[in-house]
Image (cartoon, rainbow, N blue to C red):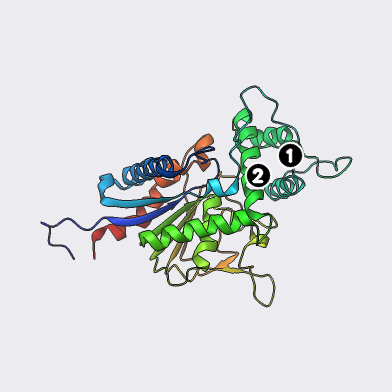
Amino acid sequence: MTDGSTPPPALSVLAVHGVGNSFGRGVLGERLEERRRLQAAAWARHLAGGLGIAPERLDLDFAYYADKLATHAGPPPQGEDDGGPLTDPLAQELMEEWAATLGMNRLPAQGHLTLPVRQLAAWLARRFDLDEGRLRVFVRLLFTEVTTYLRAVDAEERIAARAEVAARIARHRPRVVVAHSLGSVVAYEALHLAPDAGVELFLTLGSPLALPKVVFDRLDPAPAGAPAPPRGVRPPGAARWVNIADPGDPVAVPPGLAAAFDGLDLDLTDTVHPLFGFHHAKNYLGCAGTAATLAPLLTGV
């Protein structure tokens, strides 16, 4: 314990981003490190704001893997028609499975894998009272990056992304790994590959880890167990696991992970933002559930 005159040590945290965080083509070397530092500072501010502390109380490192997924093209230019079907057959298949999980029913299309992004975005906008135009861009970006990562267990992009997160864990030795969205999938797999990581808390935010057929059935290691159904398990590299999901977040479906994973200590729901910000990392980082989860770790050792 600290004695009141000595400030407690900064809490070491590794942040693992979700989709839409590419620094762009050709960002290498010192430029990449500067972007990483800026992102680390932003995540520290959001976390500190929710906790009501100075950002200096957090020693936060930012694990950047988006460049490994080779999806730097980003959203289409404003005004370009981005509402047609995804051209990648696997991306289209995963998007259709996601839509079915959310409860979207439609007449079978003539042909195969032809759900347009605009049709899904319009349905999501009505159901969740969201902006359809922003959803079109988000859905296309989401399934471009998710497909790139989950295409195959031994895909070069997947191996490289996991290795980058594992390397940042080994370098920073964080007490906490905070992972958002697709980052929760990358971090889950990276921590399984690092059983001696010594992470005290694995905090997943807006996670799609339990999304059947799209994510859950493609995890490495594969969910297992008998009798069926198979279940995933807390990574051995983390001593404790807490998940937080906004009940209105269509990416975090199903919203709870406990039904699909063993070793989950807390499965929380928290309304992080009333509008489109339901899935934004900054809103999850600053929400009450995140603050309540991290606050006990700020008391020192």
Q: Residue 29 or 129: which is nearer the viewer?
A: 29
Which quadrant is the N terminus positioned in? bottom left
Dot 1 corresponds to which residue? Answer: 86
Q: Quadrant of residue 298?
A: bottom left
- The x, y position of residue 62, in whole percent, is 41, 49
Q: Is residue 43 above or below residue 294?
A: above
Q: Is residue 228 left or right of residue 45?
A: right
Res. 143 mark:
2
Asked whether residue 11 is in view, the answer is yes
Q: Residue 285 or 35: which is nearer the viewer?
A: 35
Q: Quadrant of residue 118?
A: top right
Amino acid residing under circle 1: Leu
Query: Which is more N-terminal, label 2 or label 1?
Result: 1
Which quadrant is the C terminus positioned in? bottom left
Res. 176 mark:
none
- The x, y position of residue 19, in whole percent, is 55, 44
Q: Is residue 54 left or right of residue 165?
A: left
Q: Is residue 296 above or below residue 245?
A: below
Q: Secondary structure at mark 1?
A: loop
